[in-house]
Amino acid sequence: MRYAAWLLLMVLSTSSFAQGPIAILDARPAPDSALHQDLGAILGDAEPLVIELVSEGPSEIDREDRVVLAQSDLESADARALSDRVRASNAVVLEGGSLLTWHKTLHRAHRPTRLMYALLSNSREGRALVGIGGAGAALAGAGIVEIADLGEISRNPRRTHKLGARVALGWGPPALIDAEVWGGDTLRTLRLMERSYMGQAAHLGRGSGLVLEPRERRVRVLGEGGVVFFETGPGHRNRHDLRGGRVSLLVRGDTWDLRHGRILSSSELPTAPSPRGALEVALGELSRNPTRRTELESPWGHLLLRVRKDTRILGTETALRPIRAEFDLLNSP
């Protein structure tokens, strides 16, 4: 192997250890909320540079309090002044927009803009990068988009799906991420994960988020809303069914160990999240009666829940939750 190729291989293999935390929040946290406290712990004493993507009005990249960037304003996204501000900031918060509008704004003529390079450089230097709402979807391993907005011609005219999963930047947690406040219920997240052949998906409850900590090789749950986390294994799918998947109900402080592919529960906060959706209620019923058949009907399919030998039931008597229960999703459209 040539020295230059060896050096490049070393850089690629060690770059992740130099990255800072990448957080994805479902929405702007309310003051004094648990999510606001967790965000403060990530940012520390750093005063972040906030970049807001807006659909109307001009860009304002020289404002002191925040940067306002018009959607698809590639000249401003490619401006050296904005790039310099990002590189000099202690942390960056992105908000507004959607997965697709952020992707279109950060690329010019199919190449990255200076803003995208600056964000990546800032993160690789160990500084925090936070995405809120649609910006969080753009940072995630994958997000949900409307097929019509892609402007693509379907290779299979029989497929009439309105939604699909797409990767924009893929810098955050390596999973399909959806949220209650983004318009999706929990089983929609599961169905689109299955349809896109992804291995993991996370559905964020109200007031929650995830943070990827590359140095520790883990993903941690933020806020009080809780996260439903899905996992699938190979060989369990066909056109309308997904069998033998795993589901966990996670709370603030729980972590996903990326090194070993396991969920580590937090001993500090054993209670279940609130408010609860239909699947969270079904998971609570499964925890209270593990031998009972637990089922859930939805427009996204028929869900069967059951415990496994390695399923752990955590929490108090009134707020039980399972870690890695098993599910089958049947007759999904």
Image (spheres, rainbow, N blue to C red):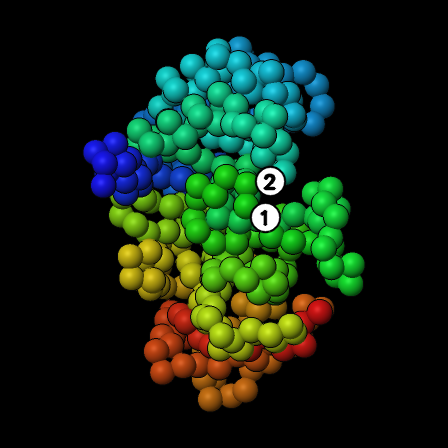
Q: Give the residue at x 33% y 32%.
A: 124
**Residue nearest the observer in this picture, 305 or 267:** 305
Q: Considering the numbered disc 1 on the image, is that residue within a helix, a strand or a loop?
A: strand
Quarter of the image with the N terminus in it: top left
Residue 168: quadrant of the picture: top right
**Residue nearest the observer in this picture, 179 or 155:** 155
Quarter of the image with the C terminus in it: bottom right
Please state the horizontal and vertical placement of residue 14, each as a whole percent of the image.
26, 40
Q: Confirm or deny contact between disc 2 and disc 1 (CB under 8 A).
A: yes
**Residue nearest the observer in this picture, 273 or 131:** 131
Mark 2 vs 1, N-terminal side: 2
Q: Give the residue at x 47% y 54%.
A: 175
Q: Give the residue at x 44% y 26%.
A: 117
For the residue carrying disc 2, how many other residues have a C-alpha within 10 Å: few (<14), some (14-19), or many (20+)? many
Q: Which mark is residue 53?
A: none
Vertical position of residue 194 compared to residue 100: above or below: below
Residue for badge 1? 166
* Residue 115 appears in the picture as rendered: yes
Q: Amino acid at mark 1?
A: Arg
Residue 290: quadrant of the picture: bottom left
Residue farthest bottom in this picture: 291
Please state the horizontal and vertical placement of residue 176, each as a whole percent of the image.
52, 54
Vertical position of residue 52 compared to residue 60: above or below: below
* Residue 14 appears in the picture as rendered: no
Please state the horizontal and vertical placement of residue 24, each as a whole percent of the image.
47, 43
Please state the horizontal and vertical placement of residue 143, each as a whole percent of the image.
57, 48
Residue for badge 2? 99
Q: Amino acid at mark 2?
A: Leu
Q: Give the residue at x 37% y 71%.
A: 314
For the residue carrying disc 1, how many other residues have a C-alpha within 10 Å: few (<14), some (14-19), or many (20+)? many
